[in-house]
Image: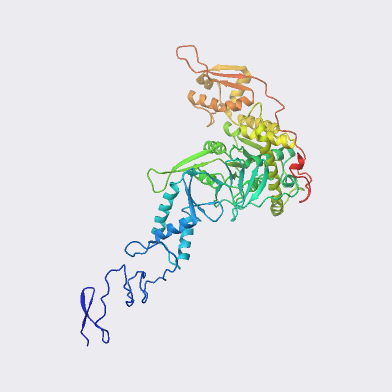
Amino acid sequence: MNTAPSVVNGHARPIAPGQSADRSTVSTDRSTVSAGTPGVNTGRAAVSGDGPGVSTGRRAVSKTVPPAEEGGKKPSAAVRLVALARERYRFVNSTDGRPYAVALDGPNVVLPLRGRSGLRQRLARLYADTFDGDVASQSALADAMTVLEGIAESEDPVPVHLRVGHDDAGTIVVDLGAADGRVVTVSAAGWAVTDRSPVLFRRSGAMAPMPAPVREGDGLTMLHGLLNMDEPMFRQLVAWLVAAWMPTIPHPVLTCKGEQGTGKSKAAQMIVNLVDPTPASKRSQPRDTKAWSTQAFNSWALCLDNVSAIPQWLSDTLCKAVTGDGIVDRALYTDDDVVVLSFRRVLAMTTIDAGAIAGDLAERLLMLDLQLIDGKRRRSEEELDHAFETVRPAVLGSLFDLLATVLAVLPNVHLESLPRMADFARVLAAVDQVMGWTTLDDYLATSANVAGDALEGDPFGSAVVALVDQCGTWTGTAGQLLEQLQPPGGIRPPSWPKDATRVGGKVKRLAPLLRTVGITVDDTQRSRDRQRHKLLVLTRTETPDESASTPPQDPLWPDVASIGHGRTAHDQH
């Protein structure tokens, strides 16, 4: 037996028969392997050497990687991930503080750094493709994301839009939602489909692609042929659709009201899928503010279907979403960091009877009261869906034609008196000027009716109206008003104020509705005694205008021109 010793790792060890005793000492430094030595299984990849490769269970890296670190060590997976990301993406920080990545050679669509379909997932796949199947660990991906977030936060915030945006020149940009990143740009000069967006967009799982619009026939008449609406009601809807692509103004909540069989849910589905196509065009009423904020943050247009009652928190939430809302919540896994969700949304809802509607929400509604569909006119869901998909590109083209024309005349539109939804009223006036319609007058008449209905649905408000009708002018403290008004049937409903403080607040909230029926509220005066009590002065100023009612109903479903025939919006001027 050959007992010649050979030093390995500092210890003498016999060598096998036939093996040279002059074998070179194996280096104990695991970071290097000498050139020309036999393979030694170290569990690490071979870094240098012309001899046999070291067995690591991985294939050798053969593609370009960042330079080796000092001492001959290869760069870590996190370093490689950051290098791959910076070669292919630029990083931005949105105005609400969210970091995003934008492909350098792709559409102008941002990617969140984390989450499903985000940059993290794409980088993991890119890493495996680049380094011959090598898989980056979760810790390496997390470290890389932290670095990239820091890069994004070092940039000045930029606007990131959802479905609809605008550039610095005021051009409206509508994201078609397709993989190629095409958009529709609309200005006073017209509209066009553009290959690359001039602004940044983000996408969500609640979005679906929108077909490219075409100039083909009278799209407005085609749309009217699918909806159960008379002419004045349909014209208000067209104006609302045009305004829905104006991201800088508040939009009233489109409310389709009617009994079963009026086609309100189907109409709302088609309307939402024109403005912001989605696989969930009709949604259930949210259970709380957090559930609502998640839905609203991920969709430009939302429809709440079959609303049976509107609680106070939802009424306030809808009002804020119309004019612009911001929700601040604590970020996950942190003590002091916050997440901000800010948005202004286009809203719709369907209802048979939503019950008592708060005054501030009533002023933000566009009510479309649908009538029962005659059995001879009723069509199947399949037929309506097929017809809608067929005419949708032409409908979009006609709506964008009208939007461009409205943008051209809107700067010169001035109204002597502005209602609560002032910006929307100006859009209606512009549509009337372009099309020769009377949508503004119809909207104001319908809004007065909605306000009257909301007042009738409030027991305390109805009691105030009855008191002023009896007295003409009533003056007193909030406590005296509470004593004088008696609840119907002697039973106090839950909405009835319980003390003088709540009476003052209730009257203040009812003031806009009371004005629509000719009653003014003055709470600026004080009593002349020592206590200087705050007084409420309720005065009947005028008799309600009996002409302020819903316009007479015209015949439904006009004769629809076939696709490719009929007038465009420009021909109708």
Q: Is residue 223 visible?
A: yes
> Which quadrant is the C terminus positioned in?
top right
Q: Position of residue 306 (x, y in %)?
A: 61, 44
Closest to the observer, 66 or 218: 66
Q: Which image quarter: residue 178?
A: bottom right
Q: Which image quarter: residue 368?
A: top right
Closest to the observer, 298 or 547: 298
> Which quadrant is the N terminus positioned in?
bottom left
Position of residue 149 relative to residue 45, above or below, is above
Closest to the observer, 277 or 197: 197
Q: Position of residue 271 (x, y in %)?
A: 65, 45
What colour scheme governs how the chains and residues are painted in the rendered image of this protein? rainbow
Position of residue 157 relative to residue 491, above or below, is below
Q: Which image quarter: residue 302?
A: top right
Residue ID at (60%, 34%): 364
Position of residue 447 relative to residue 337, above or below, is above
Q: Position of residue 559 (x, y in %)?
A: 79, 45
Position of 134 compared to 199: left or right?
left
Residue ID at (42%, 63%): 65
Q: Is residue 368 visible?
A: no
Closest to the observer, 357 or 524: 524
Q: Position of residue 95 (x, y in %)?
A: 49, 43
Report how many numbered discs are placed on residues in the image: 0
